[in-house]
Amino acid sequence: MLFLVAVHALAAVIAPGLIRIWGRRALYLVALAPAATLVWALTRTATVRSGTPVVETVTWVPQLGLEVALRMGTLAWLMVVLVGGVGALVLAYSARYFRSDDPGLGRFAAVFVAFAGAMLGLVVSDDLLLLYVFWELTTVLSYLLIGSDPTKRASRRAAMQALLVTTLGGLAMLAGFVMLGQHAGTYRWSEIATDLPGGGYLAVALVLILLGALSKSAIFPFSFWLPGAMAAPTPVSAYLHAAAMVKAGVFLVALMGPAVAGVPPWRPVLLACGLITMFLGGWAALRQADLKLLLAYGTVSQLGLLMVILGAGTRDTALAGVAMVLAHALFKSTLFLVVGIVDHVAGTRDLRELSGLGRRAPALAAVAGLAAASMAGLPPLAGFVAKEAAVEAFLHGDTADLVVLAGVVLGSALTVAYTLRFGWGAFATKGDVPATEARPVRWPFLAPAVVLAAAGLAVGLLAPAVDKVLAPYADQYPSAEPGYHLALWHGPTLALGLSALAVAGGVGLFVLRHRGRLGAAVQLPFDGAAVYHRLIGGVDRLAVELTGATQRGSLPFYLGVILLVMITLPGGALLAGMPWPQRFELWDTPLQAVAAAVVIVAAVAAARARRRLTAMILVGVAGYGTALMFILHGAPDLALTQFLVETVTIVMFVLVLRHLPAKFSERPIRSSRRGRIALGVAVGVVTAGMAYVAAGARIATPISVDFPDEAVSYGGGKNIVNVTLVDIRAWDTMGEIAVLVVAATGVASLIFRHSRDLDLRRGIPGVGRTESSRPRWLTTGATTRQQSVILQVVTRLLFHAIVLFSIYLLFSGHNAPGGGFAAGLVAGLALAVRYLAGGRTELNGAAPVDAGAVLGAGLFVAVGTGVAAMLLGGEFLQSALLDLHVPVLGHVHFVTSVFFDVGVYLIVVGLVLDILRSLGAEMDRQQETDQRETEQTDDRAKELV
């Protein structure tokens, strides 16, 4: 099962590439992933029919006890068949629905098959936390599918509405899952079901879970999001809103029903919400003129019916419920596909504009008629078998069941009425409407709908065989007498009479609607859509007010608020935690006091400086003083890194300060300045106090005491700091370099304003190059009056030596000060000097590569090192020690973590290169462009004068 999920993920990755190569025909290949799922499920039919679940467990996070626990019983098998079968057919249908030149086709294919994989994972998950992960994946992917066309406001709005409603419901559901899992000591539902808590604890957990299920399946009061989701392409609606996404809530109710059906909140909530949804959806469907919206409201109505049947909590209603899940998926997906074909061949879905289409497309009308008859509950189709089973199950219940039965019959009448409206509106000949011109329907386009409609007929005719497969699920419910069995004919029973009554009532409702006597909408005092819009409006208004009160555009204000909070909370905790540790040492050597004095003097002078460049240099002096403190504490690696970071920071500041005024403004006024001084002193005192208390309050042995031995035995190196970064705490480093890549990407996206500007980021030769006739001391740079010839000569002499030194630091860092980070900073400084000496042209000549490519290559090497370790049987990022005897060189001690260090090196070099091109070269180019445009404007003005 996990392999099938991985197949879907792989298909999602390669789908865009396949679309670019083969166009829409590639969708047939993509459809093989869900088709394989269907075939696999069908091969397990005998196992499922015997009542034996298919179980698969893979350890996920052993330290937390998390497992990928998968379990496929009868219910999950049914959902896997639907997810795989309908998914494959809809993808085949999409190969004819879309054009090869549709711009979003590759994205659609990838997201669609990824959604199918997430849905597959959801229905086979036994672990509730894993189920939640797949649940939210379907939410996010459905958001992308519904909003397939981001240029349309309706698509964006519908996608966001579905995302918010289902996500909030999912969060409530997660809280319920956590309550159950914490009580049982496990998150496996197969084990939780046998060890449920009692009383109000269980009731609260179930209500939270029901919030997730009801919101996902568009049950009242969350029904409003599904009709809006019809902004999605028709294939999306055929899959998500017939066989997949909206079935997730129904699946969850069916999954938990056998264990919790008797708990008080479960049955009343599902019956009440389901009946309301069924009536409101059915009535709204009768009022629609758009065929797709008619089916959408009909889907809402039938989802309510499914919740009523599955929420009743008996053996017979459970059997009827899973049979209805199967029937509904088959006939509703067929009808959505039919609507897509009608839209394609006729150019409209408005039933007021369609006339005579049944004569022009008889095969399409026949397929639609077969599916519509199943939806209306007519024999010999699957819908009839399931609906008769539901009516029969409620006939033998208590008074509440009889009330529900009356609601089911009335809801079925509404279903018949809007089914007739659908058939009449799409295919009938209307005397007052011109005949619809329609293109021929090609069989490859119609074939998926034919298969689904035929499957609905086959399920009805083979009802006893279907009963044998689905009965093991229903048998989980206690039953005092022999249970009901699915069959096409049970004789002239009361259930059959009530089904006939529903059909007759539906015909009457259709006739009244056709004559215009049922046009009024049903108004309720509680409208979910209105509440949603009020809440969203309120949140938006609150955001505006809060932003206006706090985001004033003043950086000192923002920093002041942050620092005040820091003083108040940690400072208050420090005072509350007195007395403090008594051990206190001023210094280990008097030289530390000298270094500290340098830092203090530089910091105070920086705060009093009036020139920006002076303040920046003084801040750098404070940083160098801190590096000196590291040296005096015996930490050469930290000192080296601090020196390099301060140097690179000074260079970056210089690049920015060139475009700012030389002096700070005269503000703030004296009183405000005193307040800032007091705030700064208080922050310093609190920070020093926190460091003192944290260092003196330690009672446990630090884990770092084992690092020296582990650095040699585990990491194969004597430099504890570097081995810690690339071996012992390699996961931390991986996260940090990922953040660096994201930060670099963000800087580039802000600075490079146009697509052509990215050529500068790539270092394309010739872009932005300024030729000069003056002598060239560097390879490609052009000397201008603003550039120093002496600096160019020195740069030419030292550049390659600095780069070689960086490589030395890279490979020696495992046993001596250095490593990938420090080495990358040294190489970055070499590039910075090259830029300062020769400008952006010289920088491009020194590094004619895309900075983004260097960043990506570094991340690829770092991640690839971890993946390679896994493929060779180790853990992710685990290092291997190799001792080799190489001729001439002799004994060579090699550690594979050096490849991870190489990745860090490339990322740091790419980051510095990106910053030099963005804050340096690109800002220079933009300034030159603005200056040139100003000069041209002045010249034109002079000519006019």
Image: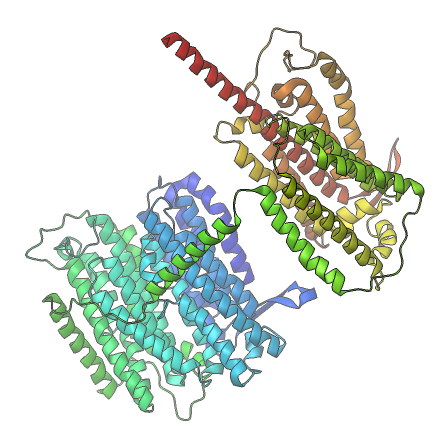
Residue 431 figure quarter:
bottom left
The percent position of residue 686, horizontal first and vertical second, equals 74, 53
Residue extending farthest to the bottom is: 480
Name above or below for residue 778 compared with residue 219.
above
Position of the C terminus, as image quadrant, is top left
Task: Tell me the colour scheme of the image.
Answer: rainbow
The percent position of residue 377, horizontal first and vertical second, equals 25, 74
Residue at 63% from the left image edge and 12% from the top image edge: 784
Residue 691 placement, left or right of 507? right
Front position in the image: 938 or 144: 938
Residue extending farthest to the front is: 671
Front position in the image: 295 or 499: 295
Name above or below for residue 65 compared with residue 944.
below
Residue at 55% from the left image edge and 19% from the top image edge: 768
Residue 230 figure quarter:
bottom left
Residue at 71% from the left image edge and 32% from the top image edge: 609
The percent position of residue 910, horizontal first and vertical second, equals 65, 34
Front position in the image: 304 or 915: 915
Residue at 42% from the left image edge and 54% from the top image edge: 540
Residue 881 shows up from this direction = no
Residue 762 shows up from this direction = yes
Residue 358 placement, left or right of 211? left
Residue 530 placement, left or right of 686? left
Residue 327 placement, left or right of 438? right
The percent position of residue 600, horizontal first and vertical second, equals 80, 40
Name above or below for residue 309 compared with residue 787.
below
